[in-house]
Image: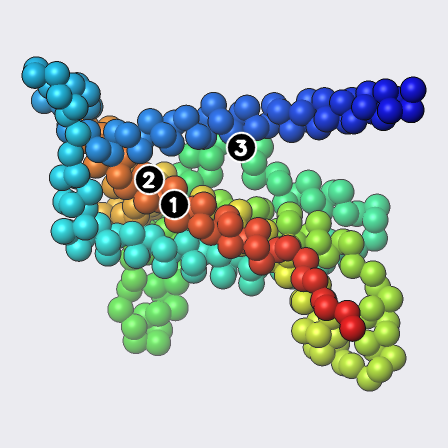
Amino acid sequence: MADTALKSAVRGSSLARWLISGPPLLYLVVFFAVPTLIMAFAAFRYPGDFGGLAPVFDSAGQLNLTLETIEALFSSGIYFSIFLKSLVYALITTLVCIAMAYPVALLIARSPKKWRNLLVLLVILPFWSNFLIRIYAWMIILGPQSVFTRGLNAVLDVFGFAPVTLLYSAFAVIIGLVYVHLPFMVLPLYANLEKHDPAFLDAAQDLGANAWQRFWRVTFPLSLPGVVAGSALVFIPALGIFAVSDILGGTDGIMIGNIIKQQFLESRDWPFGSVLSIILTIVALGVAGLAALLARPRRRAHD
């Protein structure tokens, strides 16, 4: 009787786990794994005569597959340089977001509880407006006739420097990327900092640590999981985004996402676009895996 009850409990527990984890797993398989496999297969096919993909089988019934697309990618240095530039842009965006988001998240976490929800709401408030409208707003702000640009050039002229063009530059792309992804850094940091026990800071202060030492020796190490999570949430989408560089960067701000979009929508060379997408996916998965590894709590050996 006891064995039957135990088996029923185990089956019920297993069913509950599947009911909880099944839908997300199914979602990932249908909307991530399957499209990725289709794209990986397309990378080995020939482009069609009028764009798209050529038939899988040729007129003789043979598989119509090739490695030419992959060879063309690695034989040209221009795509490597664009990919490297995208990595640099994403890295700069991540570092700037950390520097800007940390004080904001710390301020929210140490604010009275009655104000925290309001402050978090202000952080996510930009999401209430359309993404493209917000980017076009920066296009106006950084334009050559904007108050900001004219004021900056007036200051530079006083010190004898030549006027600068902010729009359609790497600077404009970085500004847009930081603006778009900053909330994704603030929220994980706040979620981590809000859980810190103030007793640790009190103990460090009792031991003679000043404010700077308390931050670097207590607060920052404890917040590293939030920093890692926020960095992954910023770096991965910043690496593959194309709308920001399309609108604010012009020809000087082209990133790998722009090249992929161009291959699929303009050149209609789907195999080459698939190769670039697979490489970008591999890099994104590598960054996500590294973030998960770094965010995992350390286990200390006990004697």
Report the disc number at residue 129: 3
Query: Who's the residue at 35% across and 44% down the image?
Result: 280
- State whether residue 214 appears in this view: yes
Question: What's the amino acid at mark 1?
Answer: Ile
* Residue 56 position within the rendered picture, expressed as x and y whole percent measured from the top left: 19, 20
Horizontal relation, residue 73 to residue 210: left or right: left
Mark 2 = which residue?
278
Q: CA distance from mark 3 to mark 2?
A: 31 Å
Report the disc number at residue 282: 1
Residue situated furthest right in the rendering: 1
Horizontal relation, residue 120 to residue 67: left or right: right
Q: Earlier in the sequence, mark 3 or mark 1?
A: 3
Q: CA distance from mark 3 to mark 1?
A: 32 Å
Where, quadrant-wise, is the C terminus in this rendering? bottom right
Relative to 212, residue 46 above or below? above
> Which quarter of the figure has residue 267?
top left
Q: How many marks?
A: 3
Secondary structure at numbered mark 1: helix
* Residue 292 position within the rendered picture, expressed as x and y whole percent measured from the top left: 57, 51
Question: What's the amino acid at mark 3?
Answer: Ser
- State whether residue 266 appears in this view: no
* Residue 128 position within the rendered picture, expressed as x and y whole percent measured from the top left: 58, 32
Q: CA distance from mark 2 to mark 1?
A: 6 Å
Q: Return the residue nearer the eye: 122 or 17.
A: 17
